[in-house]
Image: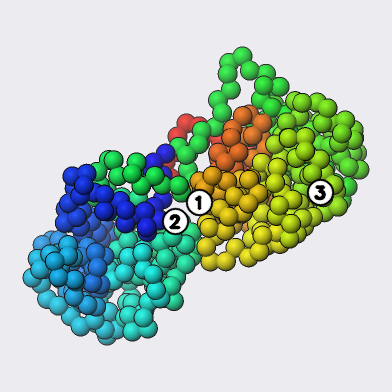
Amino acid sequence: MLDLALLTPEEMGRADAAAPRLGTPGPVLMENAGRAVARSIRARFRPCRVLVLAGPGNNGGDGYVAARFLQQAGWPVRVAAMAPPRAGSDAAGAAARWHGPSAPFDAREAARADLVIDAVFGAGLARPVAADVAAVLAAARKIVAVDVPSGLDGGTGMARGYAPTAVLTITFFRRKPGHLLLPGRTLCGETVCADIGMPPGVLTQVEPRCFANEPGLWHIPDPAVDTHKYARGHVTVLGGDTMTGAARLAADAARHAGAGLVSIAAFGRADVYRAGSAGLLVTEAPLPTLLEDARRHVWVCGPGLGPKAARDALPVLCAAQRQVVADADVFSAFAGEPDALRGAAVLTPHAGEFARVFGQAGEDRLAAARAAAARTNAVVLLKGPDTVIAAPDGRAAINASAPPWLATAGSGDVLAGTIAGLLAQGMPAWEAACAAAWLHGRAATIVGRGLVAEDLLRGLTSALTDATIGYNP
């Protein structure tokens, strides 16, 4: 699990500070970091004219080391220093060991180089990039970034004023949230996380709370040899009388995710639901009657239900202490009333639905999702190409498995049903939401371009296999 940790700039700063106490001095880490940058460049590019743009801090120090290793390999390298390192710092030591040519820190020099190494600012930059520095970066034809492209906030993935687009980014020890959150993920290009010899005990001191959402962060339930359908859980999906396809997609997804039984509680149009998948159960019994069966412990409330029905049903389900996946029309039903969602297990809003209930997420989607989870005491899955899954206790994961063709009507209903199917099998809420988000994206990748929501159901089977037997991206 710690292999998937994402460190904020502040947490990475604490890791760097702890390393010398645990036996690895800062200059050793800087030497290893610069060597990793040079090695990654040599593995991907032919020798060419390289300009290293070096800032005054440790990021610049990594750049000086990378310049030295590339020069030793026979590459033509020059260093353009934005400002000299602070005297006595590790970066100053690295700069003193650079004996190659220098260049002015200006746009003309950047434009002349075949490859520019951006070692100006790291992920912890706390202010917008100055206009003159931005102009130099913008002039570069091809950029390799050290840690992050300068100007990219490593915590939020947002650009502080300006950040260039890199073809390759080399970061160290652990990635940061900004490497996965948008637009950071696209600004970084290919991202390599290099091992630079951090002491093993560093992560236990930092205690990270954010993770990349991949298998290993969670584990799909493995049915026992003597299991039966009731042991695998019963999911009930509330079905409205107009957009019937939404509830059917959610119900079918719960079945594919492994729930033992799945029912649709039809609020009208039961005939339509009965004409669906043969394995679906359909009931017209009233909600209080259904809740008398304790085996109906997981519910999906919202897809195609209608705001009025959702507003009536959710409080009843929560009062009965059922595990509820709240989606879609729930967020219209309780617009501006976040406290009314307390009692749900998982909330799955997209950005517009989130804004309807909680207000705009703003530039820090990670912080917004965490705040919403803490307020509602529910897991909040804030959907998007950089889906964030936040738990009330502060744990969070960022999902990057979703291809753009997943943006199609009905895909959110499939996600809600997948979460419910995993909950029914006993997965804790945060783990179930994380696993479902990854499976959802992986299924879309397997199906490929041109998918419609129904296609995700067959893709889930292969995605579950990938998650169970081990997945190598």
Residue appearing at x 18%, y 44% in the figure = 23
Residue type, mark 2 in image: Pro
Q: Position of residue 169 (x, y in %)?
A: 34, 61
- Could you tell me how many numbered marks the image carries? 3
Q: Secondary structure at mark 3?
A: helix
Q: Secondary structure at mark 2?
A: helix
Amino acid at dot 3: Ala
Q: Give how far across and how far down residue 73 sits, in percent.
A: 13, 61
Residue under label 3:
310
Foreground: 353 or 378?
A: 378
Disc 1 marks a residue whose amino acid type is Ile
Asked if the residue at tag 1 contacts the one at tag 2, i.e. Cβ–Cβ closer than 8 Å, the answer is yes
284 sits to left or right of 411: right
Toward which corner of the image does residue 109 lie, by quadrant? bottom left
User: Which residue is denoted by mark 2 in the rendering?
Assistant: 177
Does residue 48 appear left or right of residue 130 in this picture? left
Measure how far apart labels 1 and 3 are at the Cα level.
28 Å
Image quadrant occupied by the N terminus: top left
The residue labelled by disc 1 is 398
Query: Is tag 2's residue or tag 3's residue first in the polypeptide sequence?
Result: 2
Q: Residues within 10 Å of mark 3 (few under 14, many from 20)?
A: many
Choose the circle earlier in sequence order: 2 or 1: 2
